[in-house]
Image: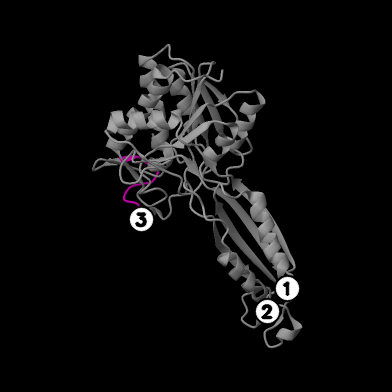
């Protein structure tokens, strides 16, 4: 079934999920916000609550002529499923659904509840998706105990890696004011690029922290620099710099902002700095959710996973602050966002089995405390 669900257009994917899961007792609630579609699918009212978290939106396919088959027409070839979103992350959502179907068929009287939280803006700036659903749930005191994010977390084989946390992400746009003039008369102008150069050296050389046993050291990276009129004989009047911090649990966004402003002020720059916090770092240590995942992996694949916190951000950053245990466990990330994105068919089946076994470990075998 083909759906070109480019961010933030769900393109009808959630309707398909709602219709299929309604057959096994899931109730669907649309919590759309702005131009983003969100759906909350839940079976059961009591606790504990296990939530599958994912997104139907995908990134643009890139040059169509470079694809071996149309990116929005799923194609089976040589043991793989090809198509944009095959790995990131429509196959993960498909595994959610098939795992729930088998589990509910075998255990119709399971304890607790199961839900799916699906958004269509994860690949965008993520301001109208999962974060909005979490606000609605919090307002009515609906608490998630365990959250499994189906993002492509694996490396060489499905289930070889579990993400137990993610670094925080803090973005900044710095605008430095100078005085435009002729390059032959620098004494009559003020070059904002030259003024920024020693500050850039300081920002790059700053040791923000040294990380810890779970996270690498905080990193600072420039992503874009804009200045000039295009003419080679004009000193520009303004410089705009876009940058990002990926930070560990050793820091918070308030501390980073303070230190950056101190560096800028020390050089007496005329500037405006706008910040956007994309997400704070989170960490789920050895908990019942991690244990249930490792137990499921051992049963299905014969191996346990390595635990990591690397990579970018995910929507798990919006769920972790509620007190939920959050992990990411999904297919291989080798082809995500690439031309000819794909997932091994065998891996999709294995992933579904892992999810089903996790539900059994937590909602059938587990005797852990409920928060209901």
In this rendered view, identify the residue nearer to me: 142 or 37: 142
Q: Indicate the secondary structure of the residue bearing disc 3.
A: helix
Q: Disc 3 or 1, which lies upstream in sequence?
A: 3
Q: Indicate the secondary structure of the residue bearing disc 2.
A: strand
The answer to whether 213 is drawn above or below residue 197 in the figure is above
Residue that mark 3 sits on: 66
- The quadrant in which the C terminus is found is top right
What colour scheme does the image use?
Answer: one colour
Q: Is residue 72 magenta?
A: yes
Tell me residue 179's x, y (percent): 74, 76
Residue ID at (47%, 19%): 22
Q: Are marks 1 and 2 in contact (CB under 8 Å)?
A: yes
In this rendered view, identify the residue nearer to me: 31 or 53: 53
Residue that mark 2 sits on: 235
- Residue 46: image quadrant is top right
Q: Nearer the viewer, mark 1 or mark 2?
A: 1
In this rendered view, identify the residue nearer to me: 298 or 222: 298
**What is the C-alpha distance between the residues marked 1 and 2?**
9 Å
Q: Nearer the viewer, mark 3 or mark 1?
A: 1
Q: Are marks 3 and 2 in contact (CB under 8 Å)?
A: no
Q: Disc 3 or 2, which lies upstream in sequence?
A: 3
Magenta range = 65-75
Residue that mark 1 sits on: 178
């Amino acid at each position: 079934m083909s759906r070109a669900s480019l961010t933030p257009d769900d393109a009808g994917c959630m309707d398909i999920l709602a219709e299929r899961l309604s057959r096994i007792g899931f109730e669907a609630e649309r919590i759309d916000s702005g131009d983003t579609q969100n759906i909350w699918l839940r079976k059961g009212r009591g606790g504990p609550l296990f939530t599958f978290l994912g997104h139907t939106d995908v990134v643009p396919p890139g040059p169509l002529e470079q694809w071996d088959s149309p990116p929005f027409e799923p194609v089976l070839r040589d043991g793989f499923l090809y198509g944009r979103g095959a790995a990131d992350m429509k196959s993960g959502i498909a595994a959610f659904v098939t795992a729930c179907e088998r589990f509910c068929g075998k255990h119709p009287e399971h304890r607790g509840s199961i839900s799916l939280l699906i958004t269509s803006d994860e690949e965008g700036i993520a301001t109208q998706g999962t974060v909005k659903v979490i606000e609605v749930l919090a307002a009515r005191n609906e608490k998630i105990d365990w959250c499994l994010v189906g993002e492509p977390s694996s490396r060489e084989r499905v289930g070889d890696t579990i993400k137990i946390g993610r670094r925080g992400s803090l973005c900044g746009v710095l605008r430095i004011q100078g005085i435009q003039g002729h390059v032959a008369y620098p004494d009559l102008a003020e070059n904002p690029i030259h003024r920024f150069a020693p500050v850039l050296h300081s920002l790059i050389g700053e040791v923000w922290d040294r990380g810890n046993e779970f996270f690498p050291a905080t990193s600072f990276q420039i992503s874009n620099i804009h200045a000039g009129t295009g003419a080679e004989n004009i000193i520009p009047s303004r410089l705009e710099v876009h940058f990002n911090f990926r930070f560990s649990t050793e820091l918070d966004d308030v501390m980073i902002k303070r230190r950056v402003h101190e560096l800028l002020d020390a050089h007496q720059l005329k500037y405006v700095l706008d910040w956007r916090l994309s997400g704070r770092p989170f960490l789920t240590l050895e908990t019942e959710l991690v244990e249930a995942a490792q137990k499921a992996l051992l049963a299905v694949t014969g191996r346990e996973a390595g635990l990591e916190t690397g990579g970018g951000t995910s929507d798990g950053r919006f769920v972790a602050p509620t007190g939920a245990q959050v992990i990411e466990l999904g297919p291989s990330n080798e082809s995500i966002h690439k031309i000819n994105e794909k997932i091994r068919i065998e891996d999709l089946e294995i992933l579904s089995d892992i999810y089903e076994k996790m539900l059994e470990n937590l909602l059938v075998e587990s005797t852990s405390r409920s928060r209901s």
